[in-house]
Amino acid sequence: MDPTNNYPRPPFERQSQPWPGLASKMSPRPDHGETSYKGSERLAGRKALITGGDSGMGRAAAIAYAREGADVAINYYPTEEADAQEVVGLITAEGRKAIALPGDLRDERFCQQLVQQAVEALGGLDIIVSNAARQQARQSILDVSSEDFDATMKTNIYAPFWIIKAALPHLKPGSAIIGTSSEQAYDPSPDLYDYAQTKAATMNYVKSLAKQLGPKGIRVNAVAPGPIWTPLQVSGGATMEKLEKFGGHTPLGRPGQPAELASIYVQLAAADASYANGQVYGASGGSGQP
Ligand code: NAD
Ligand code: MG
């Protein structure tokens, strides 16, 4: 299979949705591995909580985890119910438990309840994928309001802090925490001033926690995607100019699809990757870092 032409290439049609956007309304529709991902019991009996599990990388991870034998709870913003229900259907089709837990991650109480409800519904927890994020492009720092800045920090930095704190008492040795960072952590775009610094923070907290929790047998790693075709990009994350050419600058000449990152989220959670701790796994089509 030739990675330069196995998925759509730019130009893409201009399209915009109200935040946070739906995968089902994108053109072309992203591929999350719905018809392609094949499991092999790599996560048999595991119990995962995935934020942003309705679409994008979170959905790709949710589908793959279920096909690898895990039960999965997904969090998403309440207006994403339609996307979330598609994921619930795909997980239950594998004979796995699917728990839908909508709510706003900018709220500390909700983050605590989210973990509690996931633990109760799944009968424990041993994988956390802290993947949800807010990305809204602003040409100038002068256009970033304090409300904007606060919402980005709450979603991308505070929520993982609240969720991991609430989950830690439930995580036994062998558990895995995975954050979604970005190539933006290393090479920030001028119009992603607030977002990019949260992705640097994600890389940093993963490395700190890996040292703190490694001795307890809990591994902490991150995935750092490049340009991936997801609702985040069409609901304020990218300008129309950027969207038309999306991913065209990479050596593969196209954006990635969430499905192409699914196996990375599986790998970092799987027990046979037991020496992967504090690592950041890039998936950016050949440009960007790491
Ligand atoms: P996505 O829109 O499919 O996923 C982001 C999810 O975040 C949404 O589905 C939504 O459920 C969730 N979310 C945002 N704010 C929330 C809130 N207040 N409460 C509850 N849920 C909320 O887009 P995606 O690109 O798959 O994003 C997943 C991760 O990938 C993010 O961490 C993003 O920073 C990262 N990432 C994306 C790209 C890219 O090009 N798409 C590149 C690098 C990193
Ligand atoms: Mg979504």
Image (tube, rainbow, N blue to C red):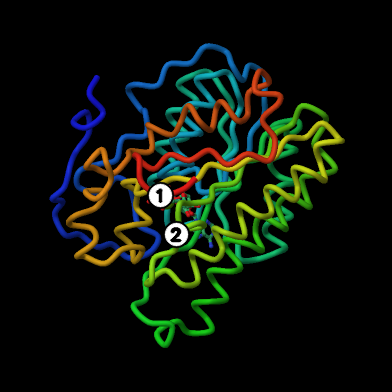
Q: Is residue 33 above or below residue 290?
A: above
Residue occupying image coordinates x 70% and y 52%: 163
User: Residue 210's quadrant in the figure?
Assistant: top right
Residue occupying image coordinates x 53% and y 24%: 66
Q: Is mark 2 within 8 Å of ligand 1?
A: no
101 with respect to 170 (left or right): left
Q: Foreground: 144 or 21?
A: 144
User: Residue 273's quadrant in the figure?
Assistant: top right
252 with respect to 95 (left or right): left
Q: Secondary structure at mark 2?
A: loop
**Which mark is on residue 224?**
none
Residue type beneath disc 2: Asp
Q: Residues within 10 Å of mark 2 (few under 14, many from 20)?
A: few
195 with respect to 276 (left or right): left
Q: Earlier in the sequence, mark 1 or mark 2?
A: 2
Asked if the residue at tag 2 contacts the one at tag 1, i.e. Cβ–Cβ closer than 8 Å, the answer is yes
- Whole-percent x and y of residue 18? 32, 65
- Whole-percent x and y of residue 190? 38, 71
**Which mark is on residue 288?**
1
- Whole-percent x and y of residue 260? 38, 32
**Which mark is on residue 187?**
2
Q: Is residue 258 above or below residue 106?
A: above
Q: Residues within 10 Å of mark 1 (few under 14, many from 20)?
A: many
Q: Secondary structure at mark 1?
A: loop
Q: Is residue 151 above or below residue 140?
A: above
Alpha-carbon span between mark 1 and mark 2: 7 Å
- Whole-percent x and y of residue 1? 24, 19
